[in-house]
Amino acid sequence: MAEAPQEPRPDAPCPDAPRPDPAALLAWYDRAARRLPWRTPPGAAARPDPYAVWLSEIMLQQTTVAAVIPYFQTFIRRWPTVAELAAAPEDQVMAAWAGLGYYARARNMLRCARIVAAAGGRFPADEAALRALPGIGPYTAAAIAAIAFDIPATVVDGNVERVMARLFAATDPLPAAKPRLRALAAGLTPARRPGDYAQAVMDLGATVCTPRKPDCPACPWREDCAARRLGLAAELPRKAPRRARPHRRGVVFVGLREDGALLLETRPPEGLLGGMTGLPGGAWREAAEPLDDPAPPCPGDWRRLTAEARHVFTHFALTLEIRAARLGPEAAPEGGAFFAPDARARAAELPTVFRKAVELALPELEAAGPGR
DNA sequence: TATCCGTGGGT
DNA sequence: TACCCAAGGAT
């Protein structure tokens, strides 16, 4: 295709500017690569298990490495192959995922595992085919293709966007700048060691080219970085302003039966905390509106706790009023609620907002004793 | 294109 | 305290 003459952009690298060398980044990676449970050492001839790469990448979506590691270890030990994960009951998978957040990931992960297992148990070594699987978007498809199969796919995550914005001093704000940052990243992707390169750019963003206080002297691309020359590194990438977070309130019931069983319910499959186990309660409404005062899920001596559970979701903050009761062996839940044995073990299988409420209520309920 | 969807750590 | 941010995807 013929090159159309392009309007020069004020923040574009001049044609004679030194082009960052992927080999320099790979040399840094050979030295500085983090050891991660799903990662093979840099330069290793053997590719990592595609199942482990896929599992780690799903867990790492919008989630920090430190948070993922224990969950990855648990999953890989409990379900060592995609076939074994595919055969697992959904409620067990959701319970094992509890606390990691973005629960639609877990359901899509299981759907994906079942598709792959039914097709023979091998992940496709092709970016487009990966992209067609549930829970695998542009980033994850490129990451699996590159890391598991050493295909020269361009991974673009938040790290890569930040590194490119600085390297080329792209001053236009996100998210509008995404297509251009992707194109810049694609222009650097090497044919040699693309899997290590993909991980190297992300490691660079995670450990050197950090959002605040980047460690420019430690950067293998320090001499090539336009933002560093301009003194802009710490200010990039720029971002469009975001909306203020609203505040909501609600009521939850923590019911403890004499035998230690906890009163729970299964949430609707879609939406917030979809498909997870939760506590019965009312609607969560804007704090300025009247509180939804729901009927108890089961008759009992319900008492309001002084303490409230506070939790912050991505797009709103929540304060939960807690109503707690010890319930007799005859207690009969209504409206889909049910008892599950071993309240303390169950709390670990709840989304964090509910786990907080249970942890506030249990000591008081246990101290009160059955005869209260 | 914009909104929805969790959580925990850093500053 | 308040805000930012993280190996994003689905709709």
Image (cartoon, coloured by chain):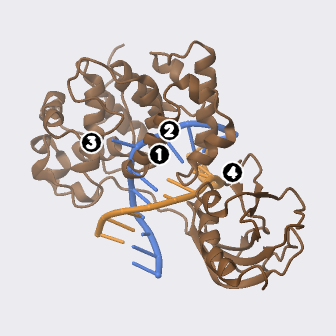
Chain colours: A brown, B orange, C blue
Query: Residue A285: where, in percent of width, then height?
Result: 74, 71
Closest to the observer: A288 or A254?
A254
Q: Measured along the vertical axis of the image, is residue A158 above or below residue A192?
A: below
User: If you read the primary sequence from the N terminus, does the residue marked by circle 1 or circle 3 appear first?
Assistant: 1
Q: Earlier in the sequence, mark 2 or mark 4?
A: 2
Decide: few, some or many residues near mark 3? Use Cα within 10 Å; few <14, some 14-19, many ≥20: some
Looking at the rendered structure, the kind of residue marked 1 is: Tyr
Q: Amino acid at mark 4?
A: Met
Q: Which residue is mark 3?
A: A203
Mark 1 and 2 residues: CB-CB less than 8 Å, in contact? yes
Compare residues A110 and A211 and report the one nearer the observer.
Answer: A110
Q: Which mark is residue A245?
A: none
Location of mark 1 (residue): A71
Q: CA distance from mark 3 to mark 4?
A: 33 Å
Tag 3 or tag 2, which sits nearer the N-term? 2
Mark 2 and mark 3, same subunit? yes
Quadrant holding the C terminus of chain A: bottom right
**Residue A63 in the figure: left or right of residue A370:** left
Secondary element at image label 4: loop
Q: Are marks 2 and 4 in one subunit? A: yes
* Alpha carbon distance from label 1 to label 2: 6 Å
Amino acid type, residue under disc 3 in the picture:
Asp
Alpha carbon separation for disc pair 2 and 4: 18 Å
Q: Residue at x 61, y 64 (%)?
A: A355
**What amino acid is at disc 2?**
Phe
* Number of dots carrying numbers: 4
Q: Say few, some or many: other residues with alpha carbon within 10 Å of mark 2 (under 14 / 14 to 19 / 20 or more).
A: some
Label 1, label 3: how many angstroms apart (C-alpha)?
20 Å
Tag 1–tag 3 contact (CB < 8 Å): no
User: Marks 3 and 2: in contact by CB < 8 Å?
Assistant: no
